Structures are given as structure tokens and as C-alpha cells.
């Protein structure tokens, strides 16, 4: 006996990836519904590579009664309006937007990092999926924090255009082609040209000069991992289609060597350590695309602080940063709370 699962935002990049991963991981689904906005009603989406086509249903008229789990990837507006309705109907919502992440009554979950927090889901019947850049960061930090207690983190991100959705990917492609043929480049989705450029600006600016993306990394890391950790982030959009990269500097309370960190990370859940000190002995977004692991490379000691390490972290933002993490939450929920059969 399996679950009845609704995918809300089924026509988007992450929604399609969710269906792909549900099929790949053979999540026990008795029924799957593709749900989207009114403009996508009737659009057919494939459930993984199964050949099974689902016609999108209108979120405004969809009845969540009798459905077990709803994976939301429709943005903050639809989440704010429809997730509480689904939750009230008895359907557990796993939401990929930022809307519920800092709600104290909503668990913010990365299964490899804080699985026990899921036990609080019943307060609102909603579970939040973290920001994509936060998800890979905390997977890499968790085993090191357990070993030597992290005091401070400085992280610079190199985030792919898929983090801005299909429009972001289309803009990189269109601008790249325009440059090659000599056509004018007109930014639409991004604030400046993204092709052959980098933009130190993701989401809106806040009063202190940081962006909301940077703020998310700070507050989400504290909620998921440890409120005592101090974190500073600079988030940058780069001309990469899929895969976020992060350069991470960590300061620990206790002594830890690069060799010890390498041994710890090699055994850490969700982490794939690829760290050969030679040409090509590290991971880039091209190799990480399509994979669910959080890759760590370039582990070395930071001589500018006491008990410091530096590392390079890469992950497919559409998978571990969004869709895979949501499905892993659903699997964890099933094991601990929604057991069937």
C-alpha cells in the first residue's frame, strides 16, 4: 500500500525533477497528481521516464482531502495561499518556497543533518525545504560541526542560472547566442548581462546591504544546524546552467586538521569527497549535474585563523538543493510517521 502524492508546480524545473526522482527512487506512490496554475491546466507532464503522462490539474480547484503528501514547488505566493488549505485537509505539505522556513512551528529539514526535527511537523502539517545553497552547505558542515564545533563560516557562492528557473536558463542561452552572432544583449530576468559575466546579486537587497539570498543562508543554517554559528555569505550568479558551487571558510572552537576533516567527510552521509591534489582532482558543476550528492573538494587548512579550514562544495541545485531533498523528506516522513501497509 502506497501514498497518494500531489506535485504542486508540476510544470516547473523543480516540479519535473521531483517527479523524476520519485520514479527513480521508487517512492511508494499509489497515485500521483500533477497540479499547477490555471494557465497550465491540461498540460501533460511525464512521471519520470516511465512513459506515464499526467494531465495538470488546477490548483484553485484541487481537493487535497484524501491525499497523503503534497510536494509544493510553486513559489511563495501559491504556498502562502494553498499550503495551509492542503494541510487543513490532512495532507502533509513539503514546501520548497521560502515562505514557511522561519516559522517556529514549521520544521526546516535536511534529512542528513537534522532528521529528528521532522517530529514537529504535526503542529501545522507543513515541512519546509531549505534554500538550495543552504542545503548543500549544511550537508558539508554537519559532520565537521559534530567533530570540532563550528564558530564561524564565511561562504561565497557561485550559483547557476537554474536557481532562477526556466527564465534564467533561457536568458543565459539567448544572451550567449546573441554574443556569438553579434546581436544586442538585453537583460530581462537578471539585473545585468549574465552570459560571460558574474552578478553579485541574488534576490532583493536588504537595509544592511546584504541580499535576501545571503540572509536566507544565515538564518536557515542557524535553524537547521546550530543557532550559535556565525555566518557571512556573498551570493553570486554565474553563467552555469545547473549546479551551485561554494567556497567555504570555517573557523572551529576545537582543533581539527585537514587530514581529519578529509577522513570525516569521506564517511559523511550525503557527501562525496573528491579531493586529489592534482590537475582535475576536484568536482565542478558539470560533473555534479544530475547527481544527488553534495561534492566536497579542495579541503585544506586556513592559516589566517586558529582552527580554520577551507573547502570547495558543489551540488546539483535542482536535485539536492530542491527536488531530491523534498523527496528525502517525504521518505523520512513515511518511515517515522506515515507508515503504510
Image (cartoon, grey):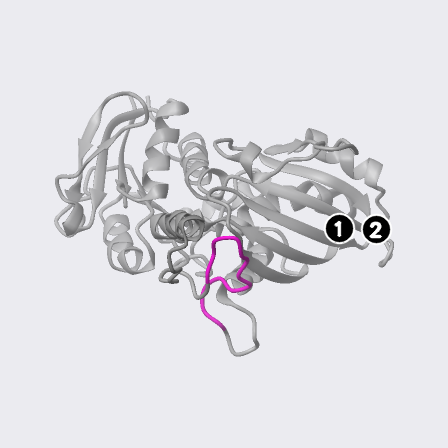
> Dot 1, how many residues are within 10 Å of its Cα: few (below 14), some (14-19), or many (20+)?
many
Q: Which residue is mark 1?
A: 149
Q: Where residue 210 appears, x then y in whole percent?
A: 56, 70
Left or right placement of residue 236 versus residue 100 in this view: right
- The residue nearer to you, when weighing 50 against 278, is 278
| The magenta stretch spans residue 259 | no
> In the figure, 321 relative to 24: above or below?
below
Span shown in magenta = 193-205
Picture disc at residue 254:
2
| The magenta stretch spans residue 196 | yes
Residue shown at 35% from the left, 25% from the top: 23
Picture disc at residue 161:
none
> In the figure, 312 relative to 30: above or below?
below
Q: Where residue 167 appears, x then y in whole percent?
A: 34, 52
Residue shown at 59% from the left, 33% from the top: 270
Left or right placement of residue 194 versus residue 11 in this view: right
Which of the image's four quarters has the C terminus? top left
Q: Is residue 207 visible?
A: yes
Amino acid at each position: 500500500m502506497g501514498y497518494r502524492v500531489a506535485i504542486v508546480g508540476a510544470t516547473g524545473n523543480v516540479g519535473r525533477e521531483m517527479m523524476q526522482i520519485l520514479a527513480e527512487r521508487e517512492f511508494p506512490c499509489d497515485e500521483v497528481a500533477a497540479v499547477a496554475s490555471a494557465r497550465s491546466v491540461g498540460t501533460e507532464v511525464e512521471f519520470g521516464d516511465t512513459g506515464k503522462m499526467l494531465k495538470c490539474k488546477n490548483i484553485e480547484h484541487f481537493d487535497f482531502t484524501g491525499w497523503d503528501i503534497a510536494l509544493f514547488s510553486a513559489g511563495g505566493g501559491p504556498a502562502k495561499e494553498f499550503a495551509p488549505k492542503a494541510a487543513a485537509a490532512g495532507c502533509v505539505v513539503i514546501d520548497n518556497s521560502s515562505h514557511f522556513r522561519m516559522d517556529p512551528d514549521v520544521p526546516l529539514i535536511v534529512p542528513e543533518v537534522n532528521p529528528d526535527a521532522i517530529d514537529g511537523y504535526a503542529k501545522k502539517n507543513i515541512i519546509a525545504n531549505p534554500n538550495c545553497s543552504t542545503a548543500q552547505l549544511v550537508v558539508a558542515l554537519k559532520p565537521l560541526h559534530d567533530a570540532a564545533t563550528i564558530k564561524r563560516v564565511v561562504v561565497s557562492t557561485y550559483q547557476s542560472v537554474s536557481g532562477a528557473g526556466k527564465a534564467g536558463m533561457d536568458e543565459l542561452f539567448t544572451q550567449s547566442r546573441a554574443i556569438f552572432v553579434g546581436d544586442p544583449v538585453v537583460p530581462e530576468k537578471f539585473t545585468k548581462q549574465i552570459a560571460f559575466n558574474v552578478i553579485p546579486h541574488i534576490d532583493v537587497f536588504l537595509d544592511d546591504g546584504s541580499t535576501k539570498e545571503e540572509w536566507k543562508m544565515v538564518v536557515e543554517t542557524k535553524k537547521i544546524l546550530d543557532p550559535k554559528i556565525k555566518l557571512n555569505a556573498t551570493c553570486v550568479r554565474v553563467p552555469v546552467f545547473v549546479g551551485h558551487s561554494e567556497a567555504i571558510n570555517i573557523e572551529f572552537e576545537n582543533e581539527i586538521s585537514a587530514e581529519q576533516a578529509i577522513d570525516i567527510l569521506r564517511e559523511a552521509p550525503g557527501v562525496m569527497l573528491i579531493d586529489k591534489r592534482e590537475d582535475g582532482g576536484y568536482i565542478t558543476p558539470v560533473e555534479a549535474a544530475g547527481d544527488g550528492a553534495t561534492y566536497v573538494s579542495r579541503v585544506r587548512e586556513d592559516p589566517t585563523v586558529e582552527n580554520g579550514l577551507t573547502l570547495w562544495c558543489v551540488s546539483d541545485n535542482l536535485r539536492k538543493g530542491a527536488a531530491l531533498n523534498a523527496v528525502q523528506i517525504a521518505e523520512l516522513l513515511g518511515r517515522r510517521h506515515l507508515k503504510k501497509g
